[in-house]
Image (cartoon, coloured by chain):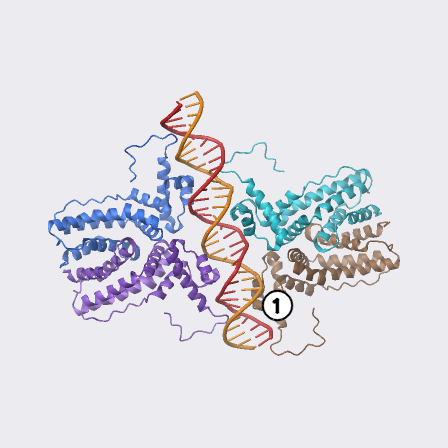
Chain colours: A cyan, B brown, C purple, D blue, E orange, F red
Amino acid sequence: MASVNELAPPRPGRKRSEASRQAILTAAADLIAEMGYGALTIEKIAQRAGTGKQTIYRWWPSKADVVMEALAAKADLQLQVPDGGSLEADLRTALRASFALARKPEVTDLLRALMAEAMIDPAFAERFLAQFLHRRRRALRVVFDRAVERGDLPPAVPVDTLLDVVLGTLWYRVMAVPAPLDDTLADELVALITGAAFG
Amino acid sequence: MASVNELAPPRPGRKRSEASRQAILTAAADLIAEMGYGALTIEKIAQRAGTGKQTIYRWWPSKADVVMEALAAKADLQLQVPDGGSLEADLRTALRASFALARKPEVTDLLRALMAEAMIDPAFAERFLAQFLHRRRRALRVVFDRAVERGDLPPAVPVDTLLDVVLGTLWYRVMAVPAPLDDTLADELVALITGAAFG
Amino acid sequence: MASVNELAPPRPGRKRSEASRQAILTAAADLIAEMGYGALTIEKIAQRAGTGKQTIYRWWPSKADVVMEALAAKADLQLQVPDGGSLEADLRTALRASFALARKPEVTDLLRALMAEAMIDPAFAERFLAQFLHRRRRALRVVFDRAVERGDLPPAVPVDTLLDVVLGTLWYRVMAVPAPLDDTLADELVALITGAAFG
Amino acid sequence: MASVNELAPPRPGRKRSEASRQAILTAAADLIAEMGYGALTIEKIAQRAGTGKQTIYRWWPSKADVVMEALAAKADLQLQVPDGGSLEADLRTALRASFALARKPEVTDLLRALMAEAMIDPAFAERFLAQFLHRRRRALRVVFDRAVERGDLPPAVPVDTLLDVVLGTLWYRVMAVPAPLDDTLADELVALITGAAFG
DNA sequence: ATTTAAGCGAGACGGTACGTCTCGTCTTGAA
DNA sequence: TTCAAGACGAGACGTACCGTCTCGCTTAAAT
């Protein structure tokens, strides 16, 4: 997105400070790790980053958007699953990668914070779904679409529901359950989905 | 909770006002419906309920606990699933009932708010999990345990993972997806779980 | 001032803290003495006084009103001039007293600050004129009215202009001139006014 | 003012823009008339004038200095009183001219603003007194000095006090009193001063 | 003609204070 | 002892300006 290479209109005035941007994202992530999202404030981010508050308000609509960009800096949002020949192989690959990312402690904290904010602030929810959740959902969907084309799944299979199942399980463990997001869970989900008769 | 039935020692002084308790729960639920959980404050609850703030602080540790009690007043937390003879029947019954409850708009709002708060406030998370989430999880677990006993499921089946799948899907739709929590989804989940070979 | 003794309706809730009121007035006066009115901020007053900002905003409409009340605590606003038998005697008494008050350094600072604010903020100007300037002007006016009754001044004398002359000179020295507000000036003004032929 | 006439070393680089200077002075005066000095900011002046903020900071040490220069553009600061033959005539001429200038609404606003700023900002006070107040005071002083030479006033008369009386009355009406700065006041002051016995 | 040195409009920057909002506690007098 | 009311110390909110610092660009004197 935002490939503004072609005709970036040379606006007047001083350029945005990349150093400040980085300092703000780092400060936000560090503060969440130290004291939790509940205690995160714009003022603390600004102070820790050594910037003015206005520099944050100028570029991000809310502190949750700062956190979302901090996550994007940590996690490649573009999930790519090469064709492994079967649904089972592809799904295992995709889930293990997703789980490995989501269980990294500094990522888990950010995920929880973002989902919480999305449930509280509808305006942010829109941005979070569009820029994060649905992006990854679409990436995972190609695995299922490929399986349907390949014949691994019957054409009538409710792909959206399968996505809800897989992603729901991931998020449920992130949010509500102490059980780990490990390869075992990935394999169990793969077995569940590939083992179901569907019909 | 705190079943003060057995031996309520007759302490001196004025009794707790049940009218105020009800007014507070109602005010909290109404305000969430009107302006969202993000705009909910203790002060607004007190003003709407016509009580003092201290009356809220005296009886609930946080505004999220007020909301949790307001939800308990709306939804019977004790899910009972009579034995329907098969896993398929029991699971369908349980899921349809759960989904019907969770998709009621005034309940959905409260669920979202509580889960959000649980992800932000670890102290509340503990109470929320113990008093709400795990209670319902245990209720659903008997359906699977019964199926294992009955032989509908092999003994080695990872029951906890199945619970995560079912409840995760429920929560994922509540939180992140516009798709409805309807009987179709319940049936698809039942088919997925009962259709899987498991081993 | 505002003797609300007669029928103070017993309002519910906590009473206003007299300790905080005093701390705020003292802090404001001290800060002006230390760093000047230009550097005075509500936040510094609150911090120095050990109160919250809201406690200031709750009781005073602006920081200038705090300063005005701090001045009232230092200077008795009710100027009383006993009848000395002649305009010359009364005027000398009144001016010497006024000048003695106004030249006290901690009072001079507050006077300058209040007049400055009155010229910048029309809403405060109204309060300052009504509650301070005109109150003292009226007190001085009785000296001249008494002189007219007594026959020391002809009935057609423009009393208001004489008040402007006397008070204008006082303020001009406070604001713009290094020359002192001493008894010499008072005597010169008395000589000027009682020596003029008026007619 | 800053007479850089003699040996302006011809420096390289772009010349100061007279258009911007005028636009800034005009914008400052207009904004004061529209919203009062209290709401005047450097940023609003720059925006209204269509200049950058730096262009203001480069040439004026504070916004009050901008206002002072805007006033100089409106009012000739050099008060000249030709010899009219008597103190009475000269003083009447001088006061009527001063009052006529000071009562013009757009001038009154600027005078109030400048005096207020001088009482708040000691650094500006120095410039204001030297470049404005004392300049006019000296111009008026020649009227009294001439009268002493001429014999209209006894040699021992406290000229400085008379200046304080006259200018104090002027400023007091500008600042604190709704009564007009009209010819009547001028005549009353002349009568007061020429009618006093002084001795 | 080219270089060099301001000045210019624009606007981002690190800060500070604003006036408001809400927190959780404390105080008051009535029930 | 609880209740409604409301003041209190605390501190974050989002905004407005401060005075400074780039940024490309326009000028104009010196090369």
State which quarter of the image contains the N terminus of chain D. top left
Give percent across and percent down for residue C190.
19, 62
State which quarter of the image contains the C terminus of chain D. bottom left
The chain carrying label 1 is B
Q: Can you tell which quarter of the image residue D15 is in?
A: top left
Give percent across and percent down for residue A165.
76, 49
Give percent across and percent down for residue C57.
45, 61
Q: Is residue B182 left or right of residue F10?
A: right
* Number of marks in picture: 1
Give percent across and percent down for residue B89.
83, 57
Q: Is residue B191 left or right of residue A112?
A: right
Closer to us: E24 or A129: E24
Q: Can residue B36 be seen in this snapshot? A: no
User: Element at badge 1?
Assistant: helix
Q: Is residue B132 left or right of residue C127?
A: right
Vertical position of residue A184 compared to residue D178: above or below: above
Q: Can you tell which quarter of the image residue B43 is in?
A: bottom right
Vertical position of residue E13 compared to residue B48: above or below: above
Closer to us: C57 or D179: C57
Task: Point out the residue furthest to the left here.
Answer: D151
In the image, what residue type sits under mark 1? Ala
**Residue in the picture at 41% in, 56% down:** C40
Q: Can residue C107 be seen in this snapshot? A: yes
Closer to us: F1 or A182: A182
**Mark 1, other Cα within 10 Å: few <14 / some 14–19 / many ≥20:** some
Q: Is residue D147 left or right of residue B152?
A: left
**Residue in the picture at 17% in, 65% down:** C153
**Residue in the picture at 19% in, 67% down:** C89
The residue indicated by pointer 1 is B23
